[in-house]
Image: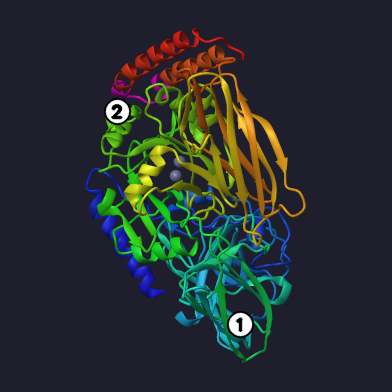
Amino acid sequence: MQRLVLRAALVAAALLVCAGARLRAQTAWMWTHLWGLPELQGYFPRATGTAFVAADFSPRRWPEAISGPYRAGVLDWPEVVRVRVRDGKVAFAKPPALPPLVAGMRHQAILIEVAESDAPDAAFPLLHRFDARDGRVLRLSFRSGAAHLFLVEVSAPPPGTSAFELALEDAAGKEIGRLPLPLEAGPAAHLHVDVVDATTKKPTPARVGLYGDGERLRFTGAADAIAIPVFQDLVSERFVRDPTWPVANHLAFACRGSFDADVPPGRVRLVVKKGADWKLVDESFEVAAGESVTKSVALERVFDRAAEGWYSADDHVHVGRDGSNDADLLAWTQSEDVHVACTMQMGDSTRLDFLQYAWQEAGVARAGDHLLLPGQEDPRSGVRGHALCLWNAVTHWDAKRYLAYELPFDATRADGGLTGYAHGASAWEGARGLALSLPLGKCDLIEVFNNGALDLDGIYGAWNLGYRVTPTGGSDFPYGRQRSLGDSPFFVKVERKFSAQEWIDGLRAGHAYVSNGPLVDFEVDGALPGDVVSKAAAGAVELKVRARVNPTLDALKEIQLVVNGDVVVRKSAAVGEESELSLTATLDAPSSRWIALRVEGQRTVAHTNAVHVQIAGEPSWRREGLEARVAAFEAKLDELREAVVATFGPKEQEDALEPLLRAAKERYAELRAQAAKFPPAR
Ligand SMILES: [Zn+2]
Ligand SMILES: [Zn+2]
């Protein structure tokens, strides 16, 4: 623990140095732990109530926190320790009735309410970690004026009854008072688990959930989990967003290949998962008090997408890198089997966060066929969306012309990189950004897969105007609740030997699909998603579809062929087709069009890039209604101009944007003129 804290401090110091005078490093305080009731029930299975949000406590930022939107926390839990502060004295409202703990076990929890009245308003929820090996005094900070509800995560209490003390401190760190807090811990069982690749018999990283206490599923944790950077913290466990996780409790950790844990005697449930290609292991067994148990988990592949040339990726992982944490980050990506984790520096018009130490090859870290690839989510505004730049050679950032995203896009593309929009180009007025970048030919990709859900309006709108844009997926880790590495992945076909450059080239070619489960093969006249099929005259195209899914994670429901935004063919999985479903079809193509494939599982989903069928030189647009859709995009340009004038201040921003807006309008005029040559509905 001490070592991790020290390392975090060193990383923070390094970031400050790199940032230089003009750019500030990330503030030390952030919302790092957002809890809803489902997460909380990992600790308190009988808890009921509404959402509960806990934040790491930082006295410095307390005034903002207490007036912030996260104040309410309602939790019905019978064993809350109620402490009262009156006239500078501390007392229990009634004698504490603490739940019995398990000796040595990590991540147990107690709830402590600190208030000045006996009927406090909704308490401000806070998370506090307490390792019983660090001393016998649990120190909590209390600020007068609001009730506090501390979720105290207790790790490794000693066996038997121990005399701990609760010390309350004021904002200045001065002790207000102390109370005896006896903790009782029953005997544990000890567990050692080896996770190996069933083929090589070698240890392999994987995601692990370990749940004790029978069906109450209290999380137990492990002593040697991979440290995951969450803002300024390093955490050893985190709730995962994963519809295929078989346990209601989604708190899990990243295991390097083996771990040790103390668990409560009784039934233990062990869940091990390594991405979408490997069989998930879910087993339960009994352990007795004082017993030491060794388990070996052999992970088997269902399929090997990488061997077929398709490499999984997350294009949106916010982790700062100075080189010192690359090995841990790579072990983490291996545990989720994310082959390419795009580590994204993040900016706005005033600052940069999650700094990267180098770019392109110099910034790539690699272990086997998993790698970290630096990029930037920047520019980023509420005026025209959040931009993604991949494979940029330096940080592209210009505060004075910040809203002219096309300038860093040009620079990134000149570097050999790719550019586009995050969050489906729907959040934060991304549609305005698309309306400008698309006609100027500067948008390569749209991150359509977020939070395990498809956000397709932006990319369908682009395809319907004939623009070839590639769909990607990203987690935006660690923002929001339960964002986890690779929770919304995409796959890129790599033609030659896997490397960062080859992967970027595959992405540039558009050979990609997003999926959190199904493995998808899709061809139109032998062409891959992202390709153009050029035909001299109207005629038929041959479609070949195969969808597979790992039966330990999901079952297939339906495949859908999407043409110009409409589902034209559906095929449901019949009995016996739950894990593999194929379709060959001949589709009439009387005019140009785009064709994509969507695969629905029971819990997961996939969507390919479009194959663009162009007939007699006509773009692969949706000709019908095109004029109205162009007009809507033009209106977005006007909206963007007005928003910049109204909200962004310096005239330089307007001046930088103006020639781009003019050029885009010219391109739309050309598009209308071109469209006039083709009849609208065929
Ligand atoms: Zn964003
Ligand atoms: Zn982001």
How far apart are the alpha carbons under marks 1 and 2?
59 Å
Is residue 652 in the magenta section? yes
Q: Would you say 461 lies left or right of 111 here?
A: left
Q: Which residue is mark 1?
A: 183
Work out whether residue 99 can be spotted. Answer: no
Q: Position of residue 674 (x, y in %)?
A: 45, 11
Q: Nearer the viewer, residue 403 or 599?
A: 599
Amino acid type indicated by mark 1: Leu
The reply to whether discs 1 and 2 touch (Cβ–Cβ < 8 Å) is no
Q: Would you say 260 lies left or right of 402 here?
A: right
Q: Which residue is mark 2?
A: 401
Q: Position of residue 539 (x, y in %)?
A: 58, 22
Q: Which residues are magenta?
A: 644-653
Q: Position of residue 534 (x, y in %)?
A: 47, 25
State whether the magenta stretch is mostly helix, strand or loop. helix
Residue 159, by quadrant, is bottom right
Q: Would you say 519 lies left or right of 382 here?
A: right
For the C terminus, give its image quadrant.
top right
Work out whether residue 592 can be spotted. Answer: yes
* Residue plotted at (53% across, 64% down): 274
Q: Would you say 487 lies left or right of 212 here?
A: left
Q: Secondary structure at mark 1?
A: strand
**Which is nearer the N-term, disc 1 or disc 2?**
1
Residue 561, by quadrant, is top right
Looking at the image, is mark 1 or mark 2 nearer the viewer?
2
